[in-house]
Image: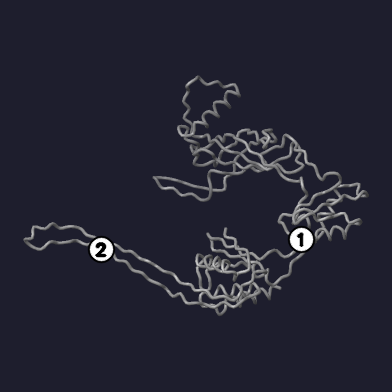
Amino acid sequence: MFSTAHSIMNRLMSGVAQPINILFTTLMVLMLSTPCYAERIKDIANIQGVRPNQLVGYGLVVGLDGTGDQTTQTPFTVQSLITMMGQLGVNLPPGTSLQLKNVAAVAVTAELPAFAQPGQRLDVVVGSIGNAKSLRGGTLLMTALKGIDGQVYALAQGNVVIGGSGASSGGASKQVNQLSAGRISEGGTVERVVPTKVGTNGILHLELHKTDFGTSQKIEEAINKKFTGDIARAVNGRTIDVRVPEAADDLVKFISELESLSVTPAQGSARVVVNARSGAVVMNQNVILEPCAVAQGSLSVTITPDPSVSQPNPLSNGVTADTTKTNIDIKQEGGALISLKGGATLNDVVRALNTLGATPGDLISILEALRASGALHANLEII
């Protein structure tokens, strides 16, 4: 398998006068040379109702080394601190002006998994919502994390770990990665249970991660082959209903066996994905290119100002003045018409695109034009 992949890569890179400066990953080549493998149902579908819930809260990070919020621009930080101190029994005189440098207001988020029980630990993410320069070295004070219904489901507190670093001196600064957001590993504690109901009236609803009628039908066949009684029925390209057998007295064991079944997913639709920022291009094995002709060329217009001095003739009572002469240069590079043969495989498509010698920007334009003309049989997605 790997020898075939290397052979394809060598053929792609040989004989190409101007290869595209684009990242074609090894995954692309392996997709061409290897068949589809079976996947477990748990990897391509989930049981309806078994899902996480998002939590959010507002809190304060203290203990910063002078990198906290500027209180004159973030009055909510001072207001939050005064309220917290009042709850702890510290009453400040009215009109007190606090000049804080070591406190930052933050938003705290976490994901509450299904079947979470009180006392279970959660990872939380902390992000500055003011103008704090850095949260490095800070400690998050106890923060209530609420769900969409406004109820408190977890509490968060702990030392914030920042992945970035930075330094400044004499007006110069250097920063690596992000300093205004961090993470607290197991910094949250579950306080309330979210009821999770699996199935209704003895029916489990499997939901595919991606809609595909072929895969839905194959899952139905695999389940009915494993369990007697034709208990599975594909409702549509996304949902498969599974009736729990009467003999299955242990629901957990039945779901475990169900999710462990192997299914070979149906081949997806032809798709070409282009990353406009990095120039990466990924295509699947179903992409087809019809015979067509492409003209590639670029028009460059260069405008260059040429400053000069206008000097009057002697005894002319003229005045010396600065003038600017503008030079305009237009260049049209080669735009030869290149014929592309029809290809039925990924190898042929990549080879045809490589012969154009296009830049990432040109390649996106070419792919869009090919798709619009009907020569490229694939869904084009630019991210």
Q: Position of residue 55 (x, y in %)?
A: 66, 39
Towards the viewer: 140 or 240: 240
Residue pushed farthest front?
373
Task: Tell me what residue is drawn at x 19 percent, y 61 percent.
Answer: 309
363 over 293 or under it: above or below: above
Q: Which residue is mark 2?
A: 325
Which residue of the protein is positioned furthest toward the bottom in this rendering?
15
Q: Tell me the number on the disc at residue 338.
A: none
Quadrant in the picture for residue 372: bottom right
Name the residue carrying label 1: 215
Instruction: Name the residue type under label 1.
Output: Thr
Residue type at mark 2: give it: Lys
Q: Nearer the viewer, residue 191 or 295?
A: 295
- Tell whether 138 sits left or right of 167: right
Residue at the limit of the structure toward the right, as seen here: 247
Outermost residue to the left: 315
User: In the figure, is residue 88 to the left or right of 230?
Assistant: left
Residue in view at x 64 percent, y 71 percent:
288
In the rendered image, residue 376, in percent from the top left (x then y), is placed at 60, 69
**SS of the residue at dot 1?**
helix
Task: Identify the element where label 2 is drawn.
Answer: strand
Residue at image position (54%, 26%) is 82
In the rendered view, tell whether residue 68 sits above or below residue 285.
Answer: above
The vertical placement of 192 against 313, above or below, is above
Answer with mark 1 or mark 2, whichever residue precedes in sequence. 1
Packing grade of label 1 (10 A; few <14, some 14-19, many >=20) is: many
Report, in whole angstroms, how far the alpha carbon at label 1 lies from the one at label 2: 68 Å
From the viewer's perspective, tell me whether residue 35 is left or right of residue 22. Answer: right
Frontmost residue, 26 versus 319: 319
Q: How many marks?
A: 2
Depth check: give the residue in front, 158 or 333: 333
Q: Quadrant of the N terminus?
A: bottom right
